[in-house]
């Protein structure tokens, strides 16, 4: 038995509406990207020259001496036992007197900790194979 004409027409209409919506969504994403670029350009032209107008970039080479991160991590793991990257980051920031709530700084320090401990793991000094909530748990290998 043939399909009713009303169903065929409604399906075609549904498909056209779905295609139109997809086109509008693509144009909306493009318009949002354009708006973001215009806002960024405006921000550049509206700067007064205040230090607060420029974003802060983290240069950890000026915060930590050479080898300080490694020695801190190894000593902390020796004293306290296994710790994850977040715990090591919080302890290091506390020790240096840095703002623990600064997410950008915290992430930069965490990446440095992971980098230094992974190089020590390749040498067989630490183990970071276990994870807790998606974060490496580091322990000394004795």
Image (spheres, helix red, strand yellow):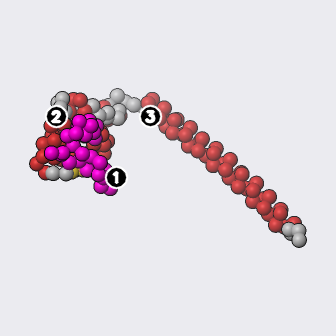
Question: Is residue 134 visible in this depiction of the protein?
Answer: yes
At which x and y percent is residue 15?
A: 75, 56
At which x and y percent is residue 124?
A: 22, 39
In this view, the residue in front, 85 or 19, is 85
Q: Evaluate if marks 1 and 2 touch, with contact meaning CB atoms under 8 Å apart.
A: no
Q: Residues within 10 Å of mark 1 (few under 14, many from 20)?
A: few
Q: Is residue 139 magenta?
A: yes
At which x and y percent is residue 130?
A: 29, 51
Horizontal relation, residue 136 to residue 16: left or right: left
- Helix, strand or loop status at disc 3: helix
Q: Which mark is residue 134?
A: 1
Q: Is residue 57 above or below residue 24?
A: above
Q: Which mark is residue 43?
A: 3
Location of the C terminus (image quadrant): top left
Horizontal relation, residue 109 to residue 9: left or right: left
Q: Which-is-in-front pick, marks 3 and 2?
A: 2
In this view, the residue in front, 136 or 58, is 136
User: Magenta segment, which residues?
Assistant: 113-142
Residue shown at 83% from the left, 62% from the top = 9
Which residue is denoted by mark 2 in the rendering? 68
């Amino acid at each position: 038995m043939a399909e009713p004409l009303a169903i065929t027409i409604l399906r075609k209409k549904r498909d056209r509406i779905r295609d139109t919506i997809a086109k509008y969504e693509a144009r909306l994403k493009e318009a949002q990207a354009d708006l973001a670029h215009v806002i960024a350009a405006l921000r550049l032209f509206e700067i007064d020259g205040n230090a607060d107008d420029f974003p802060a970039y983290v240069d950890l080479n000026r915060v930590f001496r050479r080898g300080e991160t490694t020695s801190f991590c190894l000593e902390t793991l020796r004293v306290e036992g296994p710790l994850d990257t977040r715990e090591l980051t919080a302890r290091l920031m506390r020790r240096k007197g840095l703002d623990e709530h600064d997410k950008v700084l915290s992430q930069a320090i965490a990446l440095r900790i992971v980098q230094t401990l992974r190089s020590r793991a390749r040498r067989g000094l630490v183990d970071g194979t276990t994870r807790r909530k998606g974060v490496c748990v580091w322990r000394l290998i004795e």
